[in-house]
C-alpha cells in the first residue's frame, strides 16, 4: 500500500487526507508510448502556432490583400486583427464541443479531429483569392477559414496538455509537458523566420501578389506528418482506466444539467483559477507575437524585418530556456515560477516599452522585448502541467477547455485588436504596457488561490511513476508504514 497526500487535489477546494493505494493502483509510465505521445502532441502545437504566427507577422500584408480600401490607415489593421479576434470568438464553442467529446470518446480521437481541421484551414487560407479578384468575398472567406481554425484550436492545446499530463509520471510532469510550449515556440520561431526571409528577399509587389501565400502552403506537408503521428499514439491511460468504470459513462452521458453541475458548479474554483492564469499568459503571448510587429512600425525607426528579427531572437531565447524552466518546476514547484512571471509583468512592462520606444539602439530595444518574453516564459513553461491538475479525470478535458478558451477568447486573442484600437484612439504609445500590468495583477491575485500541484497525483488518478523499481519501493514503504 502507498499513503498519498491528496491536499488540494480535487479542484473544488483544498483538503488533506491520507489514502492507501494498492500496488496495482500505481501506474508505471511506458517510455515508448510517452515518446510517441510527446512527439504527436508537440508537433501539432508547432503547426497550430506556426499558422497563428505567420498571420500576425503578415498582418500589414494581409490588410492590403484583403482590405485594400483601408490598408493605408489603422482601419485596415483593425480589420485584420478583427478577423483574428473572430477566430478567437468561436474558440469557446470548439472547447465545449471537443472538451465534451474528449471526456466521452477519448483524448486521442479529439487530437486527430483538431489537427485535421487546422490542416484544412491553413491550406485553404493559402489558396484564397484576393480582394481584387473576387471583391468582398475575399475577406468573408478569410474570416470563415480563420473561424474554422479557431473552432479546432479550441480543442487542440487543451487536449494536448491534458493528454500529456495523464501520461506523465507525477515527479516529471512539468518537464514532459514542457515539450508543448517547446512546440509552440518552435512554431512561432519558424513562422517568423519564414516571413522575415520572404520579406527580405521579395519586393513588396511580389509579396502582395503571391509571396504571402507561401508560408501557409508550407504548412500542408507538416499537417500530413502531424496527422500520421497522431494516428500512432496510444489513448491516455487515465481515460482508459476511467472508461472501465460504468459510473464514468453515467457521469459524462447524463442530462445537460448534470453535466453542467459536474463541470461548472462543482469545479468553479478551479475554473476561475484556470481563467485567471490563462489571462495573464495569453495577454502577454499575443502582445508579443501578435501586436509587437505592428507596434514596431508605429513607434518609428524600426523596420518590419528588423522588428521581426528582434521577436525571433526573443523567441529563440525562450525556446532554449523553456525546458530547463519546466524541469525546475518539478523541483521547486510551479508557483514560484508563476509568481516571477506576474512580478515581471507588473514591474517590468513600463521599462520594457520605454526601451522599445526610446532605446536608441537595437540591443537596448531587444532588451525590452526580452523582458516581455521572460514574463511569458514563466507562464507557458508551467501552465501545461498546472491546469490539468486542477480537475478530476472524468471532467478534466471539458473543464480545462471551457476555462482556457473563455479566457483566451475574451482577453488573449483580442489583445492585438484592443491595443491597436486604444493606441489609435488615444495616441498614447504606452497603452500596451498598461495592459500587461493589468494582466500581471490578475495573475498575482489568481496565484494566491492556486494550489501547488508539483509532484502530486492528478485528481481522480492513482500515483504515476517512471519505473517498476520506483513503484515497488513506494509500495514496500507503504507496507512498512502500515506495519
Image (cartoon, rainbow, N blue to C red):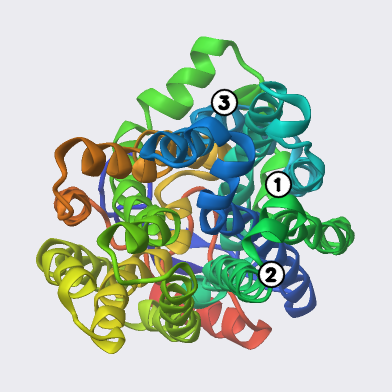
Residue at image point 50% right, 11% down: 257
Callout 3: SS = helix
Q: x, y percentage for residue 405?
A: 47, 38
Residue 345 in the image, given as x and y percentages of width and height: 19, 63
Q: Badge 3: few (under 14), some or many (20 or more) residues near its Cα, within 10 Å?
A: many
- How many marks the image carries: the answer is 3
Who comes first in sequence, dot 2 or dot 3?
3
Q: Residue 349 carries which label?
A: none
Q: Estimate the x, y position of residue 220 in percent, counting from the top left.
A: 84, 57
Tell me the crowding category of disc 1: few under 14, some 14 to 19, or many 20 or more residues within 10 angstroms, Cα based.
Answer: many
> How far, Cα to Cα, is label 2 from label 3?
39 Å
Q: Earlier in the sequence, mark 1 or mark 2?
A: 1
Work out which quarter of the rendered image holds the C terminus and state it.
bottom left
Residue that numbered label 2 is attached to: 202
Marks 3/1 in contact by CB < 8 Å: the verdict is: no
The residue at which mark 3 appears reads as: 93
Q: How far apart are marks 1 and 2 (CA)?
A: 43 Å
Q: Neighbour class for label 2 at 10 Å: few (<14), some, many (≥20)? A: few
Please provide percent x and percent y for residue 328.
Answer: 38, 83
Q: Which of these two is toward me, 283 or 313?
A: 313
In the rendered image, which residue does mark 1 sit on?
A: 107
Q: Nearer the viewer's eye, disc 3 or disc 1?
A: 3
Amino acid at each position: 500500500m502507498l499513503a498519498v497526500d491528496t491536499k488540494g487535489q480535487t479542484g473544488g477546494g483544498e483538503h488533506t487526507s491520507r489514502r492507501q493505494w494498492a500496488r496495482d493502483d500505481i501506474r508505471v509510465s511506458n517510455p515508448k508510448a510517452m515518446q510517441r505521445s510527446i512527439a504527436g502532441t508537440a508537433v501539432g502545437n508547432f503547426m497550430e502556432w506556426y499558422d497563428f504566427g505567420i498571420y500576425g507577422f503578415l498582418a500589414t500584408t494581409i490588410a492590403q490583400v484583403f482590405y485594400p480600401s483601408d490598408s493605408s490607415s489603422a482601419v485596415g489593421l483593425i480589420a485584420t486583427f478583427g478577423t483574428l479576434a473572430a477566430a478567437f470568438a468561436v474558440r469557446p464553442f470548439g472547447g465545449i464541443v471537443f472538451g465534451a467529446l474528449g471526456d466521452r470518446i477519448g483524448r486521442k480521437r479529439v487530437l486527430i479531429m483538431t489537427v485535421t481541421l487546422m490542416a484544412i484551414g491553413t491550406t485553404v487560407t493559402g489558396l484564397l483569392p484576393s480582394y481584387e479578384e473576387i471583391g468582398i468575398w475575399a475577406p468573408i472567406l478569410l474570416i470563415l477559414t480563420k473561424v474554422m481554425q479557431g473552432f479546432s484550436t479550441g480543442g487542440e492545446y487543451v487536449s494536448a496538455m491534458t493528454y500529456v499530463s495523464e501520461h506523465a509520471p507525477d515527479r516529471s510532469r512539468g518537464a514532459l509537458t514542457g515539450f508543448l510550449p517547446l512546440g509552440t515556440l518552435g512554431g512561432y520561431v519558424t513562422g517568423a523566420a519564414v516571413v522575415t526571409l520572404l520579406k527580405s528577399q521579395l519586393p513588396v509587389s511580389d509579396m502582395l501578389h503571391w509571396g504571402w501565400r507561401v508560408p501557409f502552403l508550407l504548412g500542408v506537408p507538416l499537417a500530413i506528418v502531424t496527422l500520421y503521428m497522431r494516428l500512432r499514439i496510444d489513448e491516455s491511460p487515465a481515460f482508459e482506466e476511467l472508461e472501465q468504470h460504468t459510473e464514468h459513462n453515467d457521469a459524462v452521458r447524463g442530462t445537460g444539467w448534470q453535466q453542467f453541475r459536474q463541470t461548472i458548479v462543482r469545479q468553479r474554483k478551479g475554473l476561475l483559477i484556470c481563467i485567471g492564469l490563462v489571462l495573464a499568459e495569453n495577454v502577454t503571448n499575443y502582445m508579443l507575437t501578435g501586436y509587437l510587429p505592428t507596434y514596431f512600425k508605429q513607434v518609428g525607426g524600426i523596420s518590419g524585418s528588423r522588428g521581426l528579427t528582434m521577436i525571433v531572437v526573443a523567441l529563440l531565447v525562450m525556446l532554449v530556456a523553456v525546458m530547463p524552466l519546466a524541469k525546475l518546476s518539478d523541483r521547486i514547484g510551479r508557483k514560484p515560477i508563476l509568481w516571477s512571471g506576474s512580478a515581471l509583468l507588473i514591474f517590468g512592462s513600463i521599462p520594457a516599452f520605454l526601451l522599445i520606444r526610446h532605446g536608441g539602439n537595437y540591443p537596448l530595444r531587444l532588451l525590452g522585448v526580452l523582458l516581455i518574453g521572460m514574463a511569458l516564459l514563466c507562464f507557458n513553461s508551467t501552465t501545461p502541467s498546472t491546469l490539468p491538475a486542477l480537475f478530476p479525470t472524468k471532467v478534466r478535458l471539458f473543464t480545462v477547455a471551457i476555462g482556457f478558451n473563455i479566457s483566451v477568447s475574451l482577453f488573449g486573442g483580442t489583445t492585438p485588436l484592443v491595443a491597436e484600437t486604444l493606441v489609435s484612439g488615444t495616441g498614447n504609445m504606452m497603452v500596451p504596457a498598461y495592459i500587461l500590468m493589468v494582466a500581471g495583477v490578475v495573475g498575482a491575485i489568481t496565484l494566491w488561490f492556486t494550489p501547488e500541484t508539483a509532484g502530486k497525483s492528478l485528481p481522480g488518478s492513482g500515483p504515476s511513476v517512471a519505473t517498476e523499481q520506483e513503484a515497488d519501493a513506494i509500495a514496500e514503504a507503504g507496507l512498512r508504514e502500515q506495519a
